[in-house]
Amino acid sequence: MAVMTRSSVASILLVVCGGITRAGAGELAGTAAVGNKASIEMIETYYSEVNYESTAKGEKWARTGLYWWDRAKVRMTEQTGPGRITDVRRDGGKTTVLTTETGRQRQKREAGMLVGDRSRRAVETDAWELSLFSLPVGLYRKPSYPVYSLFELVDKGQVVKEEWVEEGKRRLAHLVVDVDKSGRTYELWVDQNRNWLVARCAHVIRGPEGEVRWRIEHEVKEWAEVKPSVFVPTLVTDVRRYGGKVVSESVMNIRNIKVNETLPPIPKMPLPSSGVLVYDELDGTYYQADSSGKRIGEARRVGASYSPPLPSRSEKGLVGLPAGWWALGAGALTIGVGAFVGWRKRIKSRQAR
């Protein structure tokens, strides 16, 4: 296994940094972006367990998650309450989500199944996002906000500020990058002494008049050097503000981390029960599927895409709801309960004939 050292990062910077600088970033932003990319690419396999605790509107929420990553695919599970588990598989640019619940009689049933693109946010305990290896979005939304690495952000976005700042004994690269014309900006603090990993990040979402609506802040509080010069976050905090007011605060403990080792067995996605409702965001349809996930009968076109306006009560309430509900609730809200009930009645009527 290759080991990332400062000299190896420097060598990569000499080769690559010129290209990204020509794309619109200055020298510091280009150096930080390429160093970050080189560090993350040293991770060939990754596993961790996450304990997530959040406080919103005076209520506390807890969930746990498992995360497997082996370059080719991502597998996640999240438990958001007694008997409720969300399973996620991400490969080939597609995200598949299945949420199951155990009822009072201990009978498992599917809350629903969703298919989305690679940026589809499905759980809160995504360890890769929590570690700031990819830049966190922090909100559930349809269509999904694109997820970028630091390198992709600097390459595609517009760097509006770059400077060195001193924080105690740390010297950090401070960057402000506009994502696009949608009113989104990332403010980042990148730690050169931890191989250019992101130490703090703020995702800012503005309204049509340029006013700041959401500011979602993540900060790494503790690190571990799991292998020589391979650093990973182990304690991360999250503060979400809407209109300048704090709406939730979270603490994420990332433990039992394994990097570039043999991973615990990656579980297969559970098979749904025949007849499960699937919401396919990729082609804008919903349908019933058999236990292998294949469509049964005809697919129905979804109406308008689900994208709650800002401000909205529903989006403000996202911080206090189980992630699996929002991953699947988008489809359910778009479809409409009445339409689905009517469709099921027609199917049963045909079967009765």
Image: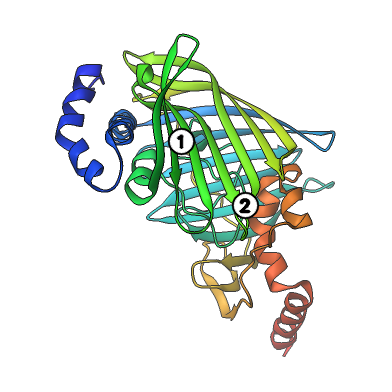
Residue 50 appears in the figure: yes
Residue 165, x across and y down, in percent: 44, 21
Q: Residues within 10 Å of mark 1 (few under 14, many from 20)?
A: many
- Between discs 2 and 1, the one toward the N terminus: 1
Horizontal side of 28 relative to 302 (left or right) equals left
Q: Nearer the viewer, residue 102 or 245?
A: 245
Q: Position of residue 231 (x, y in %)?
A: 40, 19
Q: Is residue 57 above or below residue 254?
A: below
In the picture, the disc for residue 204 is: none
Which numbered disc, 2 or 1, marks the residue closer to the eye?
2
The residue where tag 1 is placed is: 68
The answer to whether 71 is drawn above or below residue 274 in the figure is: above
Q: Amino acid at mark 1?
A: Trp
Q: Residue at x 59, y 44 (%)?
A: 138
* Residue 307 figure quarter: bottom right
Which residue is at a point 71% across and 81% down the rendered structure image? 343
Against 252, residue 324 (above or below) is below
The residue to which callout 2 is attached is 140
Residue 275 picture location, percent across and down: 64, 68
